Amino acid sequence: MGRAIHLELRYPNLALTEYTVTSPKSQEYNCFAWAAGDQERWWQPTPEDEFFWIEGVPMEETLLAYIKAYQTLGYELCNDETLEIGYEKIALYVNDEGIPVHAARQLTSGMWTSKLGALEDIEHELEGLTGERYGNVGQVLRRSNQATI
């Protein structure tokens, strides 16, 4: 699908990095769901019933709550966003207040995949989405992608 000027206007660092649009716009799911492999629901820890949130995880927009949500899927804290054979990673972007505003999942190529709100999915470099809208990476998580024997 290629590059998209409308995305570069929203996320200026995309223009400085490699990225590709990989899907059409969708309102079915958001970045937090996409990072977890869920294309059916919109993940958001708010009390309204219109969104999905992991049962038993605090319903609050904090980095700790998002970490706990992904830990229920087998992710653990990690301090390195580089590609590691045998692991899949999620990067949580946080704003200046430390509130999670975006999540990206690492692909086996080392690039990252993101769902941009109700916009498209893209494959990108991690730095491509840093900036005013999504802040910076506040935490990386990883889980083994090796089949259990």
Image (spheres, grey):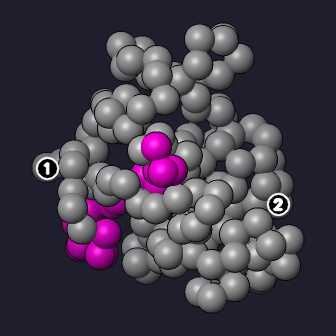
How many angstroms separate mark 1 from mark 2 (CA)?
Answer: 37 Å
Q: Relative to 47, is 103 above or below?
A: below
In the picture provided, is 92 more to the left or to the right than 28? left
**The residue stretch that appears in magenta:** 81-97
In what quadrant of the picture does the N terminus appear?
A: bottom right
Q: Amino acid at mark 2?
A: Pro
| Quadrant of the rendered image containing residue 27 | top right
In the picture provided, is 129 more to the left or to the right than 107? right
Badge 2 marks a residue whose secondary structure is loop
Please report the residue visible at 58 percent of the width from the left and 19 percent of the height from the top: 46
Q: Which class describes the residues within 10 Å of circle 2: few (<14), some (14-19), or many (20+)?
A: few
Task: Based on the picture, tell me whether residue 63 belongs to the magenta stretch.
Answer: no
Residue 135 rendering spot, x and y as whole percentages:
52, 59
Badge 1 marks a residue whose secondary structure is loop
**Residue on which the image places disc 1:** 149
Q: Relative to 145, is 44 above or below?
A: above
Task: Based on the picture, tell me whether residue 91 belongs to the magenta stretch.
Answer: yes
Residue 134 rendering spot, x and y as whole percentages:
58, 57
Please report the residue visible at 58 percent of the width from the left and 32 percent of the height from the top: 43
Please report the residue visible at 76 percent of the width from the left and 76 percent of the height from the top: 8
Q: Amino acid at mark 1?
A: Ile
Residue 105 is at least partly visible in this image: no
**Residue on which the image places disc 2:** 24
In the picture provided, is 12 more to the left or to the right than 88? right
